[in-house]
Amino acid sequence: MIKNLDIFNIISNDLEPATGRILISEPLLSDDIFSRSVILIAGMENKSAFGFILNNPSNRNLHELIDGVEIENLPVFIGGPVEKDVLFCIHTIDYLPDSIHINDGIYLSGNFDTIKTLVNLGIINNSNARFFIGNSGWAPEQLHDEINFNYWLVSETTREFVFSDFKNQWERALDFVDKKYEIWKKFPKNPEFN
């Protein structure tokens, strides 16, 4: 039996959510899609927000979803439960037409024909881009409410982290925050099975 559940309380959430920051789910969040998730906040407007789960790969690759993509090793991630029929891309290509700057040299989408061309040329690859089906969205005040309920820890991040290997990304995200959350890394994903 766990005697001190205070170790799972988020008490340093004084950092406001903002475009370019990440959300780190608390370790006991049992929702399958958000369990141990790291979400890049890609936009905020009028206290609503949207972003992408960085560490939830689907079982599909980009060439399976988009005609004309020849590269076979670009995984597509599940960005969240909203707009599940829309493909999104975050990347570091600053000259891509129609892309939107998120933060720290990270951009959202852009001209899709140009994206396909750059993928086929090998310019857009796993080290500088991530593709998502769907996104995670919050109505006005919803994200702030979830943060107040301690579902999310807000943190700064880096471009290198956003495009790093998704494996253990939740654990590595905790390196950005107070050392008191280090214990979260050791907590089993399914404590009822221990």
Image: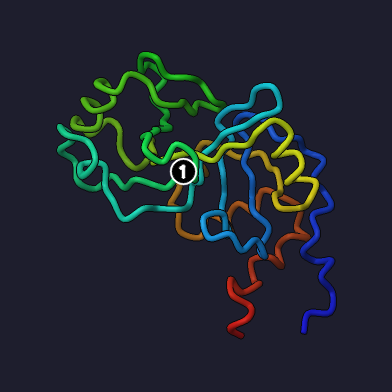
Number of residues whose C-alpha sits closer than 10 Å to that of mark 1, classed few (under 14), some (14–19) or many (20 or more): many
Name the residue type under label 1: Gly
- Closer-to-camera residue (177/188): 188
Image coordinates for residue 96, horizontal then vertical, percent: 36, 18
Image coordinates for residue 177, horizontal then vertical, percent: 71, 50
Question: Which residue was labeled with disc 1?
Answer: 79
- The residue at the point 56 percent across, 44 percent down is 39
- The residue at the point 53 percent across, 60 percent down is 32
Tell me which colouring the rendered structure shows: rainbow
Compared with residue 41, is residue 146 higher up or lower down, i.e. above or below?
below
Compared with residue 162, is residue 171 higher up or lower down, i.e. above or below?
below
Q: Quadrant of the C terminus?
A: bottom right
Compared with residue 53, is residue 32 higher up or lower down, i.e. above or below?
below
Compared with residue 13, is residue 101 higher up or lower down, i.e. above or below?
above
Q: Quadrant of the N terminus?
A: bottom right
Q: Residue 18 appears in which quarter of the rendering?
A: top right
Q: Residue 17 appears in which quarter of the rendering?
A: top right
- Closer-to-camera residue (140/95): 140
